Image: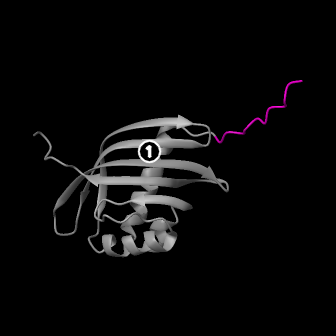
């Protein structure tokens, strides 16, 4: 006797909509409010940030990181990306560059994973690391 399958309902998402999830996160940075930024993250998300060696595993820890990061008034721009879609999840990975208030630029590699939770798309993990070499080397 075959066991009944539990069909999972998948929330639809397109590559353009995943791109908009980054835009939503980037727009939340522009508010300079850590509370606005962490609303993009699931409660159990993992943040491995660009400018810190410490993993951020709770909303309070993520908020603490963004309190300091937002003082630099970061503006992110995607340089290149690959998006992969799955049932109730999406991965956006590539390179981006942050321009900071002092005019400096921080090129970095990133991976955002998103999950559809509680009726909305949230960041379930975010890894960002500064480029180990200068571009073009």
Left or right for 96, reference 91: left
Quadrant into which the N terminus falls: top right
**Residue 36 is one of the magenta-drawn residues:** no
Q: Residue at x 44, y 69 (%)?
A: 62
Q: Nearer the viewer, residue 70 or 129?
A: 129
Question: Can you give x and y, in whole percent of width and height, for residue 80 in the image?
Answer: 30, 39
Judged from this view, the residue extending furthest toward the right is 1
Q: Nearer the viewer, residue 82 or 24?
A: 82
Magenta: main secondary structure equals: loop
Q: Residue at x 31, y 64 (%)?
A: 53
Q: Which residue is mark 1?
A: 19
Which span of residues is magenta-colored?
1-11
Q: Is residue 110 visible?
A: yes
Count of residue discs:
1
Question: Can you give x and y, in whole percent of width and height, for residue 63 in the image?
Answer: 44, 73
The residue carrying pointer 1 sits among few (fewer than 14), some (14 to 19) or many (20 or more) residues within 10 Å by Cα, namely some
Judged from this view, the residue extending furthest toward the front is 1
Q: Is residue 111 above or below residue 99?
A: above
Left or right for 3, reference 22: right
The picture quadrant where one finds residue 56 is bottom left
Q: Is residue 32 visible?
A: no
Question: Can you give x and y, in whole percent of width and height, for residue 118 in the image?
Answer: 67, 56
């Amino acid at each position: 006797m075959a066991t009944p399958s539990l069909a999972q309902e998948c929330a639809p998402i397109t590559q353009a909509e995943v791109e908009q999830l980054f835009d939503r996160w980037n727009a939340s940075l522009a508010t300079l409010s850590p509370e606005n930024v962490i609303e993009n993250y699931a409660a159990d998300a993992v943040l491995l940030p660009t400018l810190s060696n410490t993993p951020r595993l709770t909303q309070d820890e993520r908020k603490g990181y963004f309190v300091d990061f937002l003082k630099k008034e970061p503006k992110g721009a995607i340089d290149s990306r690959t998006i992969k879609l799955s049932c109730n999840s999406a991965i956006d990975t590539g390179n981006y560059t942050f321009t900071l208030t002092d005019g400096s630029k921080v090129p970095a590699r990133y991976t955002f994973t998103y999950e559809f939770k509680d009726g909305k798309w949230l960041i379930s993990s975010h890894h960002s690391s500064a480029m180990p070499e200068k571009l073009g080397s």
